[in-house]
Amino acid sequence: MYRFLISPRWIALHVAIGALVALMMNLGFWQLHRLDERKSVNAQVTEHIATPVADFNAIVTSNGDQSELEWRLVRLTGTYIDDEMVLIVNRSQNGAAGRDIVMPLMFADGRKVLINRGFIPLTVDIPPTPTGEVTVVGHLRPSQKRSALGAIDPSEGTLAEMQRIDISRIDQQTTGSLEPMYVQIVESTPPETVLSLVPLPELTNGPHLSYAFQWFFFSAVALFGWIFVVRRKISEASRATTSA
């Protein structure tokens, strides 16, 4: 009565269902792992945003662990280098398409750090760069990396526009060398009057938990569906044997 279960067609079905259930279970656990990562990042961001403002030169070093500094608030004073400005394009805020204005701020000793001065819509002209000494307070951010499907910036030449704040790429077209992290501005003296602040990330857990439940549910449906089909086939075989 059960011999049909080891026929080639049924063995193929068992293997397919087993592989499908294993795949969906692993996807569910992967989403739970992503949730744990998201919570860890949110906790770090929350902690770093709440820390007192520190002096940039006191905490940023060229060989330190930059990941431990992201979102720390820092203060720095210097002069903007207007002719080394780069526009970070394909940005949007509050439903408006625009770009971020990024340029080096030079310290008195000649060192430079990139400052993301803020967002400006495409419909608004880029305002003049503040002249003279500027004091900036902002969040430390690491160099941005290209995603798997992200647009590619040319590797050579001087670029007026770029897709991301790639410190090493911008460093190729600036005089001197840039510090290993950039600063996302929160306030400055004199104040920015036209540019909008780049918002902080949304500190939510995202959809990972619901996605995990969905994958576990799908795997349960596949498993119980397989059980239902097997039991029905056994019942049919049993009736056929009894009637014979």
Image (cartoon, grey):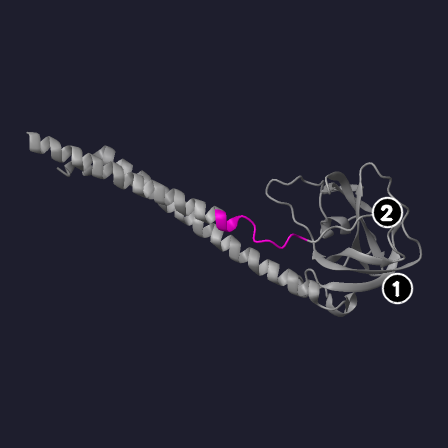
Q: Nearer the viewer, mark 1 or mark 2?
A: 2
The residue nearer to you, when weighing 143 against 198, is 198
Sooner in the amino-acid sequence: mark 1 or mark 2: 1
Mark yes or no: residue 210 visible.
Answer: yes
Q: Main secondary structure of the magenta part?
A: loop
Instruction: Locate the C terminus by quadrant.
Output: top left
Task: Read off the magenta span.
Answer: 201-210
Residue 167 pos. (x, y %): 73, 52
Q: Are marks 1 and 2 in contact (CB under 8 Å)?
A: no
Residue at 43% from the left image edge and 45% from the top image edge: 215
Residue 206 pos. (x, y %): 56, 50
Question: At numbered mark 2, what does the secondary structure look like: helix, strand or loop?
Answer: loop
Residue at 62% from the left image edge and 62% from the top image edge: 44
Reading the image, the residue beneath label 1 is 108
Rounded to the nearest angstrom, the CA distance separating label 1 from label 2 is: 27 Å
The residue nearer to you, when weighing 224 against 33, is 224
Judge left or right: residue 214 versus residue 93.
left
Residue 175's place in the image compared with 228, above or below, is below
Mark yes or no: residue 158 visible.
Answer: no
Question: At numbered mark 1, what does the secondary structure look like: helix, strand or loop?
Answer: loop
Which residue sits furthest right?
Answer: 132
Mark 2 neighbour density, 10 Å: few (under 14) some (14–19) many (20 or more): some
Reading the image, the residue beneath label 2 is 194
Label 2 is placed on what type of residue?
Val
Is 204 part of what is drawn in magenta?
yes
Residue 186 pos. (x, y %): 78, 57
